[in-house]
Image (cartoon, coloured by chain):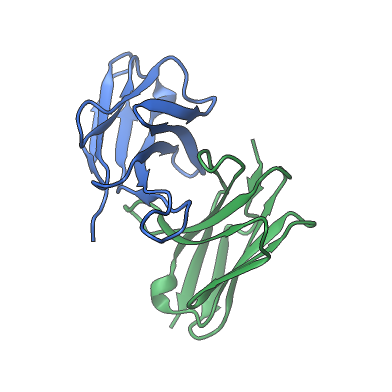
Chain colours: A blue, B green
């Protein structure tokens, strides 16, 4: 079964550094998402992306964050200047919005990248 | 931001019995509701969804019930199996893009 992959699985960075988290969504999916989960807390929506533009973003997704689909397969999340509070598990997800016959809102999640900011 | 709440952090159920996981929400604009299951070190896996025009949706052993007047949904798993042991998240949206997640309920099914 096709799956969403994410690299790296764990990223350690120093405060103030830029990080890029990478995701390869399922190949025929057109809708892409980033979420984060701070340890012990709930999963939080960051941003959704469709047709090469952001379709929706949360309050968390401020100017420090950006997303890009640089080619036909990758979907990246960049944090320009990391803060300690950015330490979390970051999940990428993709969806075909029901074109495969499954639920319209089903999103397929990757295994996550654990970001540790020191 | 506590728009979606799961008030039970954990639940233990005997194998073969029914598991009932509950979720409450505050935003009456929510139209779409999902349940996800999550194992450690993995991303959430979609289980079942329901839209606000329905009050029940069933998929195999999983049934989701929606009570709009009470702003409450529940997930029933019958019969429960040890492999169902995981953290279950409910999520809600009014746009179909941004989903608000609950804090999760850790289900343990005892063989």
Residue A26 x/y as whole percent = 26, 48
For the point 66% across and 63% down, which residue is it? B54
Q: Which is nearer the eye, A13 or B16?
A: B16
Residue A79 x/y as whole percent = 34, 21
For the point 28% across and 15% down, which residue is it? A17
| Side (left or right) of B37 relative to B63 | left
Residue A37 x/y as whole percent = 44, 40
Tell me: residue A80, above or below residue A88: above
Residue extending farthest right: B69
Quarter of the image for the N terminus of chain A: give it: bottom left
Quarter of the image for the C terminus of chain A: give it: top left
Tell me: residue B98, above or below residue A99: above
| Side (left or right) of B99 relative to A15 | right
Q: Which is nearer the eye, A62 or A116?
A: A62
Residue A93 x/y as whole percent = 36, 44
Tell me: residue A14, above or below residue B8: above
Q: Quadrant of residue B3?
A: top right
Q: Which is nearer the eye, A101 or A19?
A: A101
């Amino acid at each position: 079964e096709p799956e969403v992959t994410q690299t790296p699985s764990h990223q350690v960075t120093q405060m103030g550094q830029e990080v890029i988290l990478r995701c390869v969504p399922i190949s025929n999916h057109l809708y892409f998402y980033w979420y984060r989960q701070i340890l012990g807390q709930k999963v939080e929506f960051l941003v959704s992306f469709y047709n090469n533009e952001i379709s929706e973003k949360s309050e968390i997704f401020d100017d420090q964050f950006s997303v890009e689909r640089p080619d036909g397969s990758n979907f990246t999340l960049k944090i320009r200047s990391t803060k300690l509070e950015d330490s979390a598990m970051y999940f990428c997800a993709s969806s075909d919005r029901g074109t495969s016959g499954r639920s319209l809102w089903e999103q397929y999640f990757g295994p996550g990248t654990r970001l540790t900011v020191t | 931001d506590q728009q979606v709440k799961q008030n039970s952090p954990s639940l233990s159920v005997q194998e073969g019995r029914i598991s009932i996981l509950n979720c409450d929400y505050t935003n009456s604009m929510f139209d779409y509701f999902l349940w996800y299951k999550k194992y450690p070190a993995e991303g959430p896996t979609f289980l079942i969804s329901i839209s606000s025009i329905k009050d029940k949706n069933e998929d195999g052993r999983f049934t989701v019930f929606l009570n709009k007047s009470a702003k409450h949904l529940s997930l029933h798993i019958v019969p429960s199996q040890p492999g169902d042991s995981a953290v279950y998240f409910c999520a809600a949206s009014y746009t179909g893009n941004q989903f608000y997640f609950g804090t999760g309920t850790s289900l343990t099914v005892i063989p």
